Image (tube, rainbow, N blue to C red):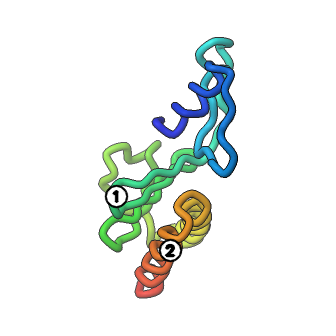
């Protein structure tokens, strides 16, 4: 994922991150040079005004004010929204997504969080 490029390049170059900067990703050097595996992790991303996260087989999508949940092991083409069938998973993943937004996007993230919260309260 693109979020892993900067940590990887920094490690390869032997460089350090300037003070005040945060990275959203991990170095892929162990995978590329030492044939090690990455530990399972939650992945987050933003495209325009939409957000998504992946946790194992689960994908949460917040798109145009709508929250959807998919199990990609069973539905790779994302045709069956499971959000209403798994409200606790949606709640947990939304909390994780909101924490990421706040951490990575700062003040802009606060505005986004308010919008996501309002849209999900309406359901």
Tag of residue 113: 2
Camera-nearest residue between 8 and 64: 8
| Residue occupying image coordinates x 61% and y 61% | 103
| Residue occupying image coordinates x 65% and y 13% | 35
Q: What element carries label 1?
A: loop
Image coordinates of residue 119 in percent, x first then y, are 41, 81
Nearer the viewer's eye, disc 1 or disc 2? 2
Residue matched to label 1: 80
Q: Is residue 50 left or right of residue 25?
A: left
| Residue occupying image coordinates x 58% and y 66% | 102
Q: In this view, does 114 lie above or below 81?
A: below
Q: Are marks 1 and 2 in contact (CB under 8 Å)?
A: no
Q: In this view, does 111 lie to the left or right of 63?
A: right
How far, Cα to Cα, is label 1 from label 2?
A: 25 Å
Circle nearer the N terminus (1, 2): 1
Camera-nearest residue between 113 and 96: 113
Q: Is residue 77 above or below residue 94?
A: above
Camera-nearest residue between 25 and 14: 14
For disc 1, the neighbor class at 10 Å (few under 14, some 14 to 19, many from 20) is some
Q: In which quarter of the image is residue 14?
A: top right
């Amino acid at each position: 994922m693109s979020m892993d490029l900067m940590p990887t390049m920094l490690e390869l170059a032997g460089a350090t991150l300037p003070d005040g900067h945060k990275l959203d990703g991990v170095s892929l050097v162990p995978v590329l040079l030492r044939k090690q595996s990455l530990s399972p992790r939650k992945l987050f991303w933003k495209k325009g005004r939409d957000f998504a996260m992946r946790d194992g087989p689960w994908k949460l999508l917040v798109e145009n004010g709508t929250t959807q949940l998919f199990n990609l092991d069973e539905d790779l083409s994302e045709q069956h929204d499971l959000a209403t069938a798994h409200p606790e998973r949606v709640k947990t993943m939304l909390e994780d997504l909101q924490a990421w937004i706040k951490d990575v996007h700062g003040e802009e993230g606060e505005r986004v969080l308010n919008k996501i919260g309002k849209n999900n309260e309406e359901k």
